[in-house]
Amino acid sequence: MQGSLGEFRLAEILQLVAVQQKTGLLRLVRGEEMVVFYFDRGILVSTRDRRHGSPDPLLDYLTRTGWLETDIAGFLRTRMENSKDDVAQVLLAERFLNEDELRGVLEDLAQELVSKTFAWRSGTYQFIGGDNALSGLQHRVSLPVDSLLMEAARRADEWPRFLERLPGPDVILEVVQPPRPQIGDRSFEVLSRITGRTTLGALVQRCRTAEFEVYEIVAQALEAGAVRVEVPPRRAAAATQPLVPPTPVHRSGARRRVQPALRAWAVALAVVLLAAAGSRLVAPELRNRAVRTELRQVATAEARAQLRLQIEIYRAAHGRYPEQLADLVTDELASTAQLARAAPVRYATTSDRQQFQLTVPPAGGESATR
């Protein structure tokens, strides 16, 4: 399975891998950039090329977020070039990280790379299937595709708001109100590292925290009046120009996150995925007929999976499940075209609308109850 990212977006490709529970390696290439994703039965398990075919993104991530000093990272990079050692194993053996820290870093790195490639509109993709692609793979994570795409869509939606007030790493921060433990461990730790006049870029390098999370915490502190921001004149003058946000990353679900506005990112995800499924599946310029056939086969299953997500989003927004599927259209969470793609389905809810049942005829092969 291979083709152009101009024909199919990452969201479509990952949904195909997840719904069909594929095992193998997905390689994305754009110019000199290459990103790899390893999947085990549709679950993302690694983003690091064990064959050393490209620079290990782990070292770059650890340097940018303050886990490693630049000179130590350079030493480790040289060592990796001259040996077959796994840098993750070296980090554990030399006690730069413990097992829990490594797992969290690898999860953050995976989300960063999904978020980075989520917006790619050029380049190529190639999926190499089979269990052999995972042979020798160490230090795995276990990340569902839907969660990764939801987070990537949320961040794409949140970045413009952050960048209006935090337009770059040279923005200067000062604490107005000392942080209190009640704000949460992660937020307290980040804000406590603002000493005197601290640039946002320096803060990121001090925190050992995902870059996106640092921006998010600072933005919330700014809105609450706990932090003062000074934008350098040259940055302020450029703030009206389109900005390319720093690559967003994700903190493991086991760690505290600042909660986003549910509706905004959920609708953003639905628009991205459903528009992709509706318009790109029949792209006439697609040359790879095998890929086109597979994507058409999965279109209905994908529409049903998104329908379940939208039902849950409706409940999160209203406190109860919709009375009928048409309510999703009224609430602008789904479209009539998507309901048609998901058909045939039967929807029912309990009298208090705290549980629902979505059933599909045996030919469709699935049912779901909440």
Image (cartoon, rainbow, N blue to C red):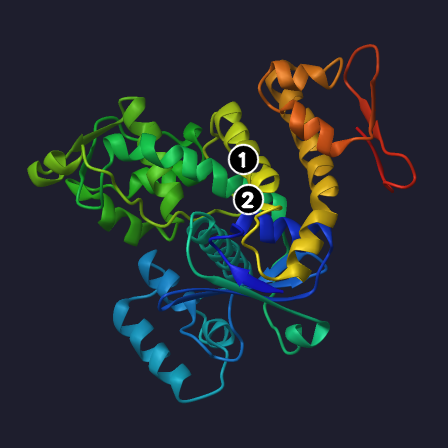
Q: Looking at the picture, which amino acid does disc 1 mark?
A: Leu
- Residue found 80% across the figure and 21% down from its top: 355
Instruction: Give 129 or 114, whichever is nearer the viewer.
Output: 129
Task: Give the numbered dot on residue 149.
Answer: 2
> Which residue is farthest left?
233
- Relative to residue 26, is residue 303 depicted above or below? above
Q: Residue at x 60, y 72 (%)?
A: 138
Residue 293 vs residue 123, the one in the foreground? 293
Q: Position of residue 150 (x, y in %)?
A: 55, 39
Q: Position of residue 85 (x, y in %)?
A: 49, 83
Give x and y (percent) for residue 343.
78, 31
First in residue order: circle 2 vs circle 1? 2
Q: Is any part of residue 70 visible from this angle?
A: yes
Residue 130 occupies quadrant:
bottom right
Judge the density around disc 2: few (<14), some (14-19), many (≥20) Cα neighbours within 10 Å. many
Q: Nearer the viewer, residue 183 or 242?
A: 242
